[in-house]
């Protein structure tokens, strides 16, 4: 399998993140076909030059590379399976890239169904904000065959700043869970640290300057400044429900590995109170 320019790309799942990623694909000059469960979300892509189709099957039939970005594994299964699902339309040798956070078990399960069709699976969950997606600067964690990843390079180049190939199917999905575990704890630690500083008489923005300019600085801390310093004026980028969904997958993986994630468990308990 060799890398090809001008790959025909299909994209399913046009939420906030998916829309920005799909626009990057278009901006890279790759022909794009789109499908979404809610047709109203297609307008942003079709007005930019994408072609819309009526079913995931039709999307796969017209694409050499199919990307998906959905909320969870069940949403992905509903896109892939059935008479009008993407699996029914996959071409032999085509590549299905799932960029969602579905967990490693689901990734391995669905990879088997894709390979049964003579196609190639890559789990490629993303790390980064919608702002980074808009700039094509996401980080990708990849699980799958090296040849398929090389072939899909023009797509990855369009949406990401860096990517890591971590192993076979499911490896990227597992790594994303490890990242989410760290983010859950980091998010809680920053929030608690800010409250501690404020109660000690330090202005919130000044305290955050120290966080972002000192030893605890991280890309997440840098680009989440507004969310922490001006939460009432900053749109929600990732909901409590979605984070807790990810953490349920984290705990499933931890149980399989036989480990206890004490700090992550504590962060999840706080999120549970925040979510009601």
Image (cartoon, rainbow, N blue to C red):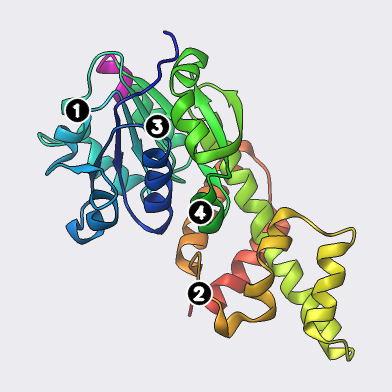
| Residue 166 figure quarter | top right
Mark 1 or 4, closer to the camera:
1
Question: Could one spot residue 269 in this view of the protein?
Answer: yes
Which residue was labeled with disc 2?
235
Looking at the picture, does residue 191 appear above or below residue 15? Answer: below
Looking at the picture, does residue 102 appear above or below residue 15? Answer: above
| Residue 142 figure quarter | top right
Magenta-tinted stretch: 113-118
In-image side of 154 versus 254 (left or right): left
Which residue was labeled with disc 3?
97
| Magenta stretch: dominant secondary structure | helix
Q: Residue at x 11, y 36 (%)?
A: 84
Mark 1 or 3, closer to the camera:
1
In-image side of 188 versus 114 (left or right): right
Looking at the picture, does residue 171 appear above or below residue 27? Answer: above
Which residue was labeled with disc 4?
246
Which mark sits nearer the N-terminus, 1 or 3? Answer: 1
Q: Position of residue 208 (x, y in %)?
A: 80, 73
């Amino acid at each position: 399998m060799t890398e090809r320019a001008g790959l025909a790309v299909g994209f399913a799942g046009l939420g906030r993140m998916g829309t920005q990623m799909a626009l990057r694909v278009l901006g890279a000059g790759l022909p794009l076909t789109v499908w979404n469960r809610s047709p109203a979300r297609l307008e942003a892509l079709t007005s930019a030059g994408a072609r819309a189709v009526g079913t995931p099957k039709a999307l796969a039939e017209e694409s050499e590379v199919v990307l998906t970005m959905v909320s969870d594994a069940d949403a992905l299964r509903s896109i892939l399976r059935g008479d009008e699902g993407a699996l029914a339309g996959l071409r032999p040798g085509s590549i299905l890239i799932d960029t969602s956070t579905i967990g490693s078990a689901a990734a391995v399960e669905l990879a088997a169904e894709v390979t049964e069709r003579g196609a190639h699976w890559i789990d490629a969950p993303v790390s980064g904000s919608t702002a980074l997606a808009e700039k094509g600067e996401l980080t990708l964690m990849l699980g799958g065959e090296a040849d398929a990843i090389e072939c899909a390079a023009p797509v990855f180049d369009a949406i990401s700043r860096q990517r890591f190939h971590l192993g076979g199917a499911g490896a990227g999905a597992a790594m994303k869970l490890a990242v989410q575990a760290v983010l859950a704890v980091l998010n809680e630690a920053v929030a608690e640290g800010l409250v501690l500083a404020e109660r000690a008489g330090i202005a919130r923005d000044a305290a955050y300057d120290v966080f972002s300019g000192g030893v605890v600085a991280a890309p997440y801390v840098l680009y989440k400044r507004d969310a922490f310093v001006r939460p009432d004026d900053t749109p929600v980028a990732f909901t409590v429900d979605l984070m807790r969904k990810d953490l349920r997958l984290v705990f499933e993986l931890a149980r399989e590995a036989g480990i206890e994630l004490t700090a992550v468990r504590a962060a999840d308990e706080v999120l549970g109170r925040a979510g009601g």
